[in-house]
Image (tube, rainbow, N blue to C red):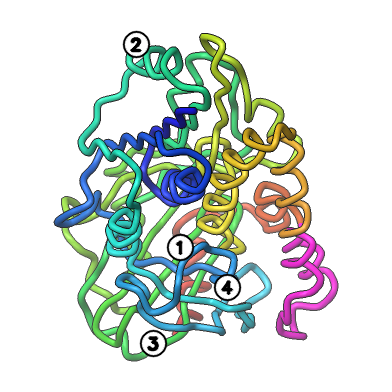
Amino acid sequence: MRISIVGGGFAGLAAAQLAEEVTADVRLYDKGAYSGNRRGAWGEMVWDYSQLPLDRHVPGYVRESNTGIFVGSSGKTAVNVPDGVILNRGELEKHWAGTLERTEITENAEVDEAEFRRLSAESDLLIDATGQFPISSRFTPLSYDVACPTLSGRIEADFSHLYPEPRALAYENYFLWIVPQSPEEATVGLGCRDDKSPSELYEDMQQLLAEIDIEPPEREALHSGTDVSNGLRSLSHCSYELNDCTVHIAGDAIGLANRLTGFGMVHAAQSGRAAVSAFVQGESYKRRLLCQNFWTKAVTGVASPIHHSIGLDGIARLAKSDIEYQESFEPQQPADILHAVRTFI
């Protein structure tokens, strides 16, 4: 049995790790390399690290962080984060790939539509973990509830007034996050639900960071991306057939990122493992994803020790999908949210 995986992020690596346990023929194709500065993937925060198939204190594991600050239209709220960890994602992925002993890894792989078809003809299971707007969108209908352009990167500056708590600001149109890795360094990102160009988003970032006395980095130092998310109802296209091969879509590719709860990387890893286990056990991959995401949302919204000042309404909002949660805020523009950014400090 051959299992081929396209995309070597959290979903792809988790899939390969489990696939090694069931077959000796595992192929992993990644567009980047597991060396040097990996794809500009900077440190991030993940909730519930115990759900990742990784040991603690491996390279890329920066520190524990069990509290955070959330800023919305109603002001600043402290949030208790269940098993929160600050990561350097690029370093963690490089270490993870190095632990795969039976996987044939092809780095800097250019997998286009023709190559994807060829891989499907040679594989029993093909996993698409190619991230936002994946290659599978050329073979099966695929859409997202939310798709937001983003800019993010690591900044070296004085973050002693923010360290150690990560901070997130969310309004209907914008979300800004700052994840201090140390008093001198942090990951900073800005996303917008409007269809803005990277240069326009960079101008907004400059304005917002200036309000908290942080010198913005050069545009070339930032990574452009797209934050996507789907509600549970949008997982119906997570599996299809191509050349008599089963194709499962995992991670960001199916829209399992969740910027407001911090479970994006956990969702990605869980979906990668589910893509393998469901196929091997002859079970429904869609059902696996629905169950996993339902219970994650339930735990996030009800069982997690969220600060009492959020109240029942806040807990209910956290349990909803990203788009529903975003719409609970009043529409804002960059100039209108500067007063909220000041509450970061």
Q: Residue at x 25, y 54 (%)?
A: 40
User: Label 3: which residue?
Assistant: 163
Side of 29 relative to 247 (left or right): left
Residues under labels 1 and 3: Cα distance? 16 Å
**Which quadrant of the structure image shows residue 181?**
bottom left
**Secondary element at tag 3:** loop
Q: How many marks?
A: 4
User: Label 1: which residue?
Assistant: 176
x and y, in percent, of residue 314 in the image: 77, 70
x and y, in percent, of residue 220 in the image: 16, 51
Q: Residue furthest front?
A: 24
User: Is the residue marked by circle 1 packed among few (<14), some (14-19), or many (20+) residues within 10 Å?
Assistant: many
User: Label 2: which residue?
Assistant: 114
Residue 166 versus residue 283 in the image, above or below = below
x and y, in percent, of residue 106 in the image: 25, 36
Residues drawn in magenta: 297-319
Q: Nearer the viewer, mark 2 or mark 1?
A: 2
Residues under labels 2 and 1: Cα distance? 38 Å
Q: Main secondary structure of the magenta part?
A: helix
Observer-nearest of 82 and 6? 6
Side of 24 relative to 292 (left or right): left
Q: Residue furthest right?
A: 312
| Amino acid type, residue under disc 2 in the picture | Ala
User: Label 4: which residue?
Assistant: 71
